[in-house]
Image: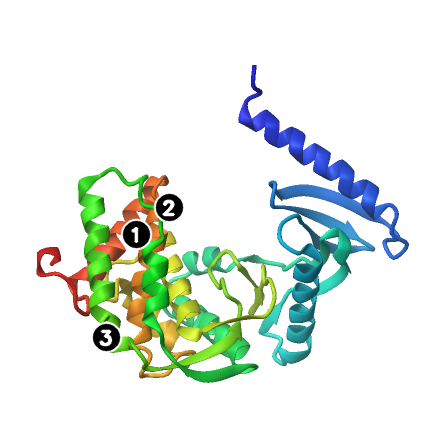
Amino acid sequence: MDKPSWIGKILAEEAASQELTAFLSTKPEVRHFTLGDGLKVTGKSWVFKAEINGEDVVIKRLFEDDVSRVVLNLKDELDFLERSFGDSRYQANRCLYVWPQDGIAVLSFAPGNRLGDQIASTSGDDRRQLIKQSGEWLRRYCSFRQRDSRFGPAFWVKKVLSVKTGRISSPQDRLLLDCLLASIRAQVDGVKGVPVVQAATHGDFVGINAHYHQGTIYGVDIQGESWLAVAKDVARFLVWLQIHNPVSAGGHRYGISLEYIDAFLESGVLNANEQTTTLPFLIAEQLYGRFVEGYAREDLRDNTRAAIEMYLDAAPGGDDKCR
């Protein structure tokens, strides 16, 4: 008889813990350590809390792709950020040790609350300032390495079309996705070739991939140098925030609460032209992917559905039957 899944998870975590303990015990630079809870144990990676040489850390072990290259890229990026972030309010966790051939990196533990939880716990001017500071964190990261380019929407349309939607059985929800896709396609001619700022950026800057502590935002889960349109990271942050902590009162733009989008853009992270071209297009792309990805969770499904409906209410282009 197969073991219940929760027993399998416990056994997998215990085995991973024993293997990491044996590994760390052989490293002379690790004078003393205590391995803590497993944050993630899958076939792709392990992530554990620990204390090494008196410092709280996170240990990552990777198993997929070229692990040596991935670990070295991670180290290079975090070392670069440690040298580059010149303001104590804007930081990233540090890379302390790496063993590339084993796919293992040890990172400093970012203190405080997850940024998304911190935003959810505030209101009024405190929330506006925190969201603006979040945009400022991303603006500073992107300012180190950026280039001017032209936007190619075909790549993103292809990405949307590749999303597998078989799990969505509701005819109403399938129609909603069809309407969102129609809006995306209707925007293609208007955004094709428009100026776009690309940068080496976080790549997944959302509320669970940053911490807030005593006035400082720490970026975490940074994988390496990742070049993207800055508008993509802006769209990703705003959509994640809207569907995890939805705000519908006070108006919205592109399906995002004005309370969120206005404060984030006040940071200057995105120029005025892209706020009306690439940003609405990429918000739609993010909404499409997030709806499918989170469909099994009723709360995320409902929140994302509401955001899509708000987006389509004033969508740039689209099908009249969807309004």
In-front residue for pair 5/185: 185
**Of circles 3 and 2, which is in front?**
3
Task: Name the secondary structure under disc 2.
Answer: loop
- Quadrant where the N terminus sits is top right
What percent of the width, then of the height, locates residue 51? 76, 51
What residue sits 35% from the left and 51% below the top? 163
Q: Is residue 285 left or right of residue 147?
A: left
Q: Is residue 74 left or right of residue 215?
A: right
Which circle, 3 or 1, is nearer the viewer? Answer: 3
> What residue sits right under mark 2 in the picture?
294
Q: Which residue is mark 3?
A: 189
319 with respect to 42 (left or right): left
How packed mark 2 is, by other alpha carbons closer than 10 Å (few <14, some 14-19, many 20 or more), is some
Residue at the extreme left? 321
Q: Amino acid at mark 1?
A: Thr
Residue 304's label in the rendered image is: 1
